[in-house]
Image: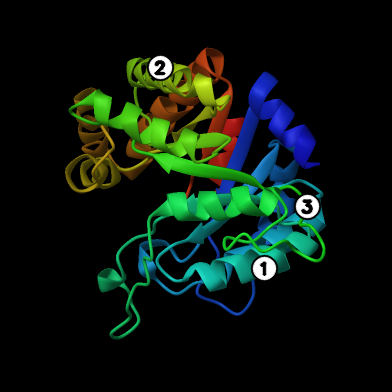
Amino acid sequence: MFDTLINKLQNGTYITLETTPAHSATFLPTVQKIEELGLHELVDGFSTTDNPLAKLKYNALFGAKMLQDRFHKPVIATMSMRDRNKIALQSDLLGANEFDIRTILALTGDPATISDQPKAKGVFESDSTLLLDIISAFNSGMDYAAKPFVVRPQPIYPFTVVNSYAKNPKTLQKKMQKKIKHGTVGIITQPVYDVENAKELLELLEKANNECCSENKSAQLILGIFPITKLRTAQFLASHVPGINVPACWIDKLRKASEQGAQEEYKVGFELSKKLFDDLKELHPKIHLMTANQFQIAKDILV
């Protein structure tokens, strides 16, 4: 299962769908909705988020287990550095390993100061490269302290993220190089809204891989897509989310459409998003689709 996913990532068409566990004691409704829409037949795998924006949600590793068991497709479980020290990270990896949760998205994590939990404190022993180093150690049969395991873990495949836009593109290349050197196999971008932006990211990834070739390390770029169907979403992403660039033409088209009503606004936003998905898939068929659990939109984009 994992070999197939990595082979698709490296050599073929690769599409994964993000899921966000709810503030709930059950993840089952999410699994059922995906099955009801047949989304598991349209993607190569899924991901589960880990308390995004430091808001309490159902556990990403358990969510990954449920999805993987139901659909027999690999799930990239997110693990944040915000909430765990190196002991907890390794313990979670060991437990997940026995249950065959072996594709891990390493994130530094959003600051605990924005959490919905009173006086929550972040751990942040390091950034996501610490988790990459831990995974590298596990894949060598030992823990982070170089102590060999009694039973060697099964191979773990680490993924990371990178912004899709920066005023100085060289900074993105350096971040890519750092993550490649620490062993990432796939780098998922923040949402991309322009084909030229995607081309630039691919060029940066190629340069980063070339810089790391002496260490015999490389990674694949996975283009993130987040469909926009509302003007306010486009404005919020453009104004308040660093590392994302929403073209002015998108905002202008959505503004004009919104003046004609919500239905027209949705229609125009969906058409822009669908065309972007198709264009990016033709350019570089390695895509991570994010819809904030709006799974009908995901299906409409994918079919």
Left or right, 67 with reference to 129: right
Secondary structure of the residue carrying tag 1 is: helix
Q: Position of residue 154 (x, y in %)?
A: 78, 52
Q: Looking at the image, is mark 2 or mark 1 nearer the viewer?
A: 2
Write the residue at 68% across / 37% down: 43
Type of the residue with mark 2: Lys
**Count of numbered badges drawn on the protein:** 3
Type of the residue with mark 3: Gln
Left or right, 39 with reference to 89: right
Residue 226 visible in the picture: no
Label 2 Cα neighbours within 10 Å, binned few <14 / some 14-19 / many ≥20: some
- Give me the disc on residue 207: 2
Q: Earlier in the sequence, mark 1 or mark 3?
A: 1
- 165 or 98: nearer the viewer: 98
Between the C-alphas of marks 1 and 3, the distance is 18 Å
User: On screen, 290 above or below 6?
Assistant: below
Q: Earlier in the sequence, mark 2 or mark 3?
A: 3
- 101 or 241: nearer the viewer: 101
Q: Position of residue 69 (x, y in %)?
A: 81, 58
User: On screen, 256 above or below 139?
Assistant: above
In this figure, which residue is indicated by the disc labeled 3?
A: 154
In this figure, which residue is indicated by the disc labeled 1?
A: 62
Q: Position of residue 241 (x, y in %)?
A: 25, 46
